[in-house]
Amino acid sequence: MTSIYLEARAMPSQSSELLKLMTDVLDEVILTMPVDSETPARVTRIGNRILKAAVERRTSYAALIEVASAEADVILRDSPNWPSVMRQTEPGEFPPNRVG
């Protein structure tokens, strides 16, 4: 079993609202990334970071966005195209190559 699976099993029973919040945060952060940076491994990495924050009882929207965004920033910095993969968007705004 993976460690993230064990951590998730250690989480107290959570409501469907928290699960919805976690997936919404993941979707929102992924939308800020360049399309060519969205590999399944990177999405999973950000999702695992969100799950870890929830296990640590950091379950507010702000806390989850903070950890997910920080993980996305690390991923993009590790990208061979850094900084050309970065783009400026306002919160809630779709990046230029996205359709809203």
Image: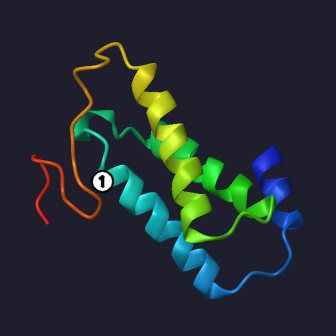
Based on the displayed image, in which of its 4 quarters is residue 85 positioned?
top left
Q: Is 28 in front, or is 40?
A: 28
Looking at the picture, how far across and down is residue 93, in whole percent?
Answer: 20, 60
Whether 2 is drawn above or below 7: the answer is above
Q: Please count the marks in the image.
A: 1
Q: Is 2 in front, or is 86?
A: 86
Looking at the picture, how far across and down is residue 84, in whole percent?
Answer: 22, 21
- Residue at (24, 41) in percent of width and height: 35
Residue extending farthest top: 80
Whether 20 is drawn above or below 93: the answer is below
Residue extending farthest right: 10
Q: Is residue 57 left or right of residue 95?
A: right
Q: Is residue 3 left or right of residue 23?
A: right
**Label 1 sits on residue:** 31
- Residue at (54, 39) in percent of width and height: 71
Q: Residues within 10 Å of mark 1 (few under 14, many from 20)?
A: some
Q: Is residue 90 left or right of residue 29?
A: left
Based on the displayed image, in which of its 4 quarters is residue 12 positioned?
bottom right
Looking at the picture, how far across and down is residue 15, in whole percent?
Answer: 69, 86
Q: Is 56 in front, or is 15?
A: 56
Which image quadrant: the C terminus?
Answer: bottom left
- Residue at (62, 55) in percent of width and height: 50
Colour convention of the picture = rainbow
Q: What amino acid does circle 1 point to?
A: Leu
SS category of the residue bearing label 1: helix
Based on the displayed image, in which of its 4 quarters is residue 77 positioned?
top left
Whether 78 is drawn above or below 29: the answer is above
- Residue at (29, 19) in percent of width and height: 83
